[in-house]
Each structure stands twice: as C-alpha cells, then as structure tokens.
C-alpha cells in the first residue's frame, strides 16, 4: 500500500491561503508601530544560525522558541508580540510505499524520511542579504535587533527525502548513494506524486526549468529585497521613526518574514503542476514532466486529470 501523510486537506490549503492573504494585508501596516515602547532588547538569529535540528524541535513545540533560541523575541500573543505558532508535528512517515518493487532492490521502500526545511533558507537565501542589516541591526541604525529567528516554527516545512533507516552502510540495499540516478528519481517521484511535497535532497541553487528560469534562492532573495525596500520607505513616513536617530526597532518585519515563509511553504507543498521554483533537481525534473504553464491545459484545475 502506498500512503502519504504529507498531503494537506482542502480545508488546510484554504486556511493557509487565507493566512498568506491576511499577511499581505498586514504588510501595509507600519513595522515601527508594532510595539515602539517595548523596553526589552532581543537577539536575532540570522541566516547563518540556521539549524535543521533546532527548527524541527521548535516546529514540534513552538512554545520552546525562546528556550532554544535565547534572547529571541517571544511569540506569545502579549501586547505588540506575534501569536504563538501552531504545532507542526514531524510526520511519521511523510509517505510510505509497501507495494512497489523497484528493480534491483530487496523490498519495497516502506517509510520515507523527511527533512525539516527552512522555507527561507538560512545560507542559500538569507545569509549576507540586506534584510540581515535590518533584523540584526548590523550598522547600528536602529535601537536594537528585532529578535527574529531563522529557526522559528513559521519558517519550517516538512519535505520528503530518503530514509536513513532504509539506506546505509550494511543495509541490504546499501547506501542511498549506491543507487543509480534514475532509480533515485523514480523513488522520490512517487512521494512527490502523492502530494507529500517537493523532494528535499541536495542543494537548492540552480534548479530551474526552461519555463521557470528563476531559481528558488533567487526567488526568495527577490522577496527579501522587497521587504527591505518596504521598511526603508515606511521609515521615512512613520511619525514614530522618521525624526529619530537611531530609528525604533521595526519589530513588524518579523511577521512579514513569517508571512513570506508560509507562502513558500504552501508552494513547496502545493500540487506539482503549480510549482514555479524548486528545492531540488528531483522537483524540477518532475514538474518538467507535468508542467502545463503556458498551455491551454493551465486553465484546468491542477488536480485534474490526476497525476
């Protein structure tokens, strides 16, 4: 039997879309007016501080954010602060296939592994970008750091990968690296086809198709630049900020970054026909097989006909 626990229900997908839409509306609000009188000082965990282990821990229990990331700005719903994130429990498994017998393997794949992926990737997307000058206050232009954490639960999404329990030295079928590229693709294609999301294996840079030439990191960096530009524009308009030196801390940017993360997560978990940027070569290749962008077929619902 092949099963997936990675596919979101229509209700969840609609809820995510509403959340992203509301986030877009909230980005019209001034980031400096979120909590201008907050007396605390915070520590930002920028891109280079990314940790998949920390991310998974915080996704499973968002209340432990400040315990795991000391000095980060709390997300507890108190005055001026973000609400606590929803718990996002590690899927066990994200997908399993107990029936397909692949040539040369001793048994069906069984349970697939999953990766806790940073939607805004720390090293490949955020590290060294101008947004870090804002949230980390690198140039001393603001009264302090925003306390954002690259490992906060809103920046995480679970994506399918190969299982470390299934593949490894001494295992009946050897290591994942022993498999041919074609077999690896067929195995990961099954999970992507099921709705578990884009396969998460390898680097994220440079994975494009002819119809979608912008890479995942470049897409995210463009969005981060838009956020940075918006902060600079609002800084000149805000009565709380424009006449102050240094400027107040733009705490509202933390929510903007979370809204961006949620939009990316929804994309990576969306229907394979809808993808326009890719976390892996496996995802780019599979979308290339099913892509209907630029054709009459794009007028049909993504899920029809079934993959």
Image (cartoon, grey):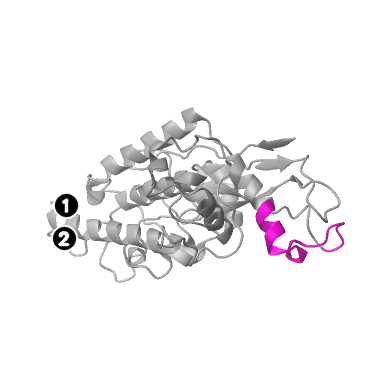
Picture coordinates of residue 35 (x, y %)? 28, 46
Picture coordinates of residue 10 (x, y %)? 49, 29
Which mark, residue 240?
A: 1
The C terminus - image quarter: top right
Q: Which residue is mark 2?
A: 244
Q: Secondary structure at mark 1?
A: loop
Q: Secondary structure at mark 2?
A: loop
- Above or below residue 134? Residue 3 is above
Residue at image position (83%, 54%) is 105
Picture coordinates of residue 223 (x, y %)? 33, 57
Start-end of magenta stretch = 169-186
Residue 170 included in the magenta stretch of the image: yes
Taking depth in this image into account, of 257 and 193 the one nearest to the observer is 193
Residue at image position (44%, 54%) is 72
- Above or below residue 121? Residue 298 is above
Does residue 161 appear in the picture of this structure?
no
Residue at image position (41%, 58%) is 212
Q: Looking at the image, do the residues carrying marks 2 and 1 touch, with CB atoms under 8 Å apart?
A: yes
Side (left or right) of 40 relative to 115: left
Picture coordinates of residue 77 (x, y %)? 39, 37
């Amino acid at each position: 039997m092949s099963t997936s626990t990675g596919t979101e229900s229509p209700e969840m997908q609609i809820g995510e879309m509403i959340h992203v839409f509301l986030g877009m509306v909230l980005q019209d609000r001034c980031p400096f007016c979120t909590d201008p009188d907050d007396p605390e000082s915070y520590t930002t965990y920028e891109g280079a501080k990314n940790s998949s282990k920390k991310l998974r821990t915080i996704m499973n229990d968002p209340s432990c954010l400040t315990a795991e990331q000391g000095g980060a700005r709390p997300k507890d719903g108190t005055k001026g602060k973000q609400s606590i994130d929803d718990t996002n429990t590690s899927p066990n498994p994200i997908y399993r296939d107990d029936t397909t017998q692949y040539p040369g393997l001793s048994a069906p794949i069984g349970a697939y592994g999953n990766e806790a992926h940073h939607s805004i990737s720390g090293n490949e997307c955020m590290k060294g970008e101008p947004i870090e000058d804002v949230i980390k206050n690198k140039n001393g232009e603001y009264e302090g750091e925003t306390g954002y954490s690259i490992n906060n639960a809103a920046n995480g999404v679970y994506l399918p990968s190969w299982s470390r329990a299934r593949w490894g030295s001494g295992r009946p079928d050897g290591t994942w690296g022993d498999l041919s590229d074609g077999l690896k693709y067929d195995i990961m294609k099954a999970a992507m086809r099921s709705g578990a999301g884009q396969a998460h294996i390898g680097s994220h840079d440079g994975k494009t198709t002819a119809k979608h030439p912008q890479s995942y990191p470049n897409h995210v960096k463009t969005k981060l630049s838009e956020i940075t530009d918006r902060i600079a524009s609002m800084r000149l308009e805000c009565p709380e900020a424009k006449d102050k030196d240094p400027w107040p801390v733009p705490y509202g940017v933390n929510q903007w970054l979370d809204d961006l993360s949620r939009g990316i997560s929804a994309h990576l978990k969306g229907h394979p026909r809808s993808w326009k940027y890719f976390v892996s070569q496996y995802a780019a290749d599979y979308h290339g097989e099913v892509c209907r962008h630029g054709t009459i077929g794009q007028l049909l619902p993504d899920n029809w006909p079934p993959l």
